[in-house]
Amino acid sequence: MSDEEIAAIWAYDHPPYSNIVKLLILTGQRRNQIWKFDPSWVDDGVLTFPSSIMKTNRAHSIPVTGYGQHLPNQPFSFNGWSKAKRRMDTRIGVSDYRSEERRDWEKSRNQK
């Protein structure tokens, strides 16, 4: 994905889906990890995903620096991923990508 496509996705505002997508961009985590987010996972400026939701079955911690204001005060209540993605794609004019490409973009940004 290009920086321009990510910017268009970032500008889209249709909560709760857009809030989830922003956290996906900021953290580089998988959809289910963010969707299952619980505020109790944040402690002293560190977000720790429990092993039970991680693909590797190991807890994963990342600092909250720079995106803490985007973390919800309660777990997300959301259903309809495909419909919400289609709606966003139509409104912003970005399509033909998989959500995994966003993770690839995030990894490439961290390598620069």
Image (cartoon, grey):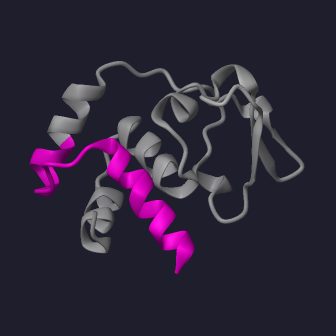
Residue at 16% over, 36% down: 86
Residue at 55% over, 74% down: 111
Residue 31 place in picture, x, y as percent: 46, 34
Along the line of sight, the residue nearer the viewer: 107 or 84: 107
Residue 88 place in picture, x, y as percent: 20, 44
Along the line of sight, the residue nearer the viewer: 91 or 6: 6
- Residue 87, image quadrant: top left
Residue 102 place in picture, x, y as percent: 37, 53
**Direction front: furthest residue:** 56
Judge left or right: residue 93 versus residue 54.
left
**Direction right: furthest residue:** 44
Judge left or right: residue 104 versus residue 94.
right
> How many numbered markers are drawn?
0
- Residue 72, image quadrant: top right
Magenta run includes residue 103: yes
Magenta part of the protein: which range?
A: 88-112
Along the line of sight, the residue nearer the viewer: 47 or 74: 47
Magenta run includes residue 78: no
- Residue 53, image quadrant: top right
Task: Determine whether 81 is above or below 65 in the image.
Answer: above
Judge left or right: residue 68 versus residue 6.
right
Prevailing SS of the magenta stretch: helix
Looking at the figure, which quarter contains the N terminus? bottom left
